[in-house]
């Protein structure tokens, strides 16, 4: 629990809780990378795509636009149909928003109360998106994860299986890693010309092209992950 006078310098690091936090993040990272190409991670990857598209939708609504629908596809792609809003703010919101939500979930996992709040908010968001989903992949994802989080919550409250914080942390780490990887895969390794960064470069060509914007967004996403690690240690100090 964070004290009234946070230990920003991380003096006397690391206590037992900080060590558990770092080890758990490391284990999550290894598991994610080891299972990256397997079907076991597919649902979590689709959740990350969902948060990417939801971030586009949130940016659209915040800039007075209208969200016509959201789709998440089984091939780990997704689309958000919007009308109006500020286009140059909506475009980067997917990658950067996904990284931001990853940071929020990692930080929420440091405390049982905040993990419960994060899980509850996540369920509400899934139910809201269920109402505007345009395909059955996204509908199935929403229903499946609502049920999954519901089961984890019941186990947390009624049994000795205390895994809610670890599930929230895993989703957070997954989201952070997938965001950085997605930027690399779309813009550096194979250059997808329909990517958000390529579209952003057309709207705002200075100071660089789509690959340049992808690198900038990737660095920002990595900073979100590093910031989550640092703030997590501060909270647990």
Image: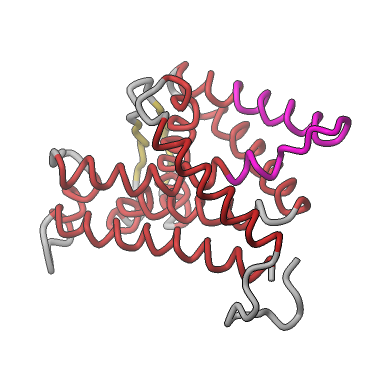
Vertical side of 158 occupied by 230: above or below: below
| Position of residue 50 measured from the top left corner of the image (x, y, whole percent) | 46, 35
Is-magenta flag for residue 234?
no
| Side of 84 where 191 appears, left or right | left
Q: What kind of colouring is applied to the model shown? A: secondary structure
The magenta span reads: 144-169
Q: Visible in this render: residue 193?
A: no
| Position of residue 158 measured from the top left corner of the image (x, y, whole percent) | 88, 31
Outermost residue on the right side: it is 158
> Image point 57% across, 28% down: which residue?
131
> Image point 60% across, 39% down: which residue?
125
| Position of residue 18 measured from the top left corner of the image (x, y, whole percent) | 65, 62
Quadrant position of residue 163: top right
Is-magenta flag for residue 161?
yes
Vertical side of 214 occupied by 151: above or below: above
| Position of residue 24 measured from the top left corner of the image (x, y, whole percent) | 59, 48
């Amino acid at each position: 629990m964070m004290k009234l006078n946070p230990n920003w310098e991380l003096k006397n690091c690391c206590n037992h809780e900080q060590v558990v936090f770092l080890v758990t993040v490391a284990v999550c990272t290894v598991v994610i990378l080891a299972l990256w190409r397997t079907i076991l991670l597919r649902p979590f990857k689709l959740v990350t795509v969902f948060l990417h598209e939801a971030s586009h939708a949130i940016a659209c609504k915040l800039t007075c636009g209208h969200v016509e629908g959201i789709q998440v596809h089984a091939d780990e792609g997704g689309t958000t149909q919007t009308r109006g809003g500020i286009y140059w703010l909506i475009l980067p919101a997917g990658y950067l928003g996904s990284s931001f939500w990853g940071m929020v979930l990692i930080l929420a996992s440091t405390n049982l109360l905040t993990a419960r709040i994060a899980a509850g908010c996540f369920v509400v968001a899934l139910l809201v998106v269920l109402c505007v989903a345009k395909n059955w992949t996204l509908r199935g994802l929403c229903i499946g994860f609502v049920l999954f989080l519901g089961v984890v919550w019941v186990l947390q409250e009624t049994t000795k299986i205390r895994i809610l914080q670890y599930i929230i942390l895993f989703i957070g780490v997954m989201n952070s890693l997938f965001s950085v990887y997605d930027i690399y895969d779309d813009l550096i390794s194979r250059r997808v010309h329909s990517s958000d960064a390529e579209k952003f470069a057309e709207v705002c060509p200075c100071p660089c092209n789509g690959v340049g914007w992808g690198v900038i967004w990737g660095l920002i996403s990595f900073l979100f992950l590093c910031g989550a690690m640092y703030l997590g240690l501060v909270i647990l100090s």
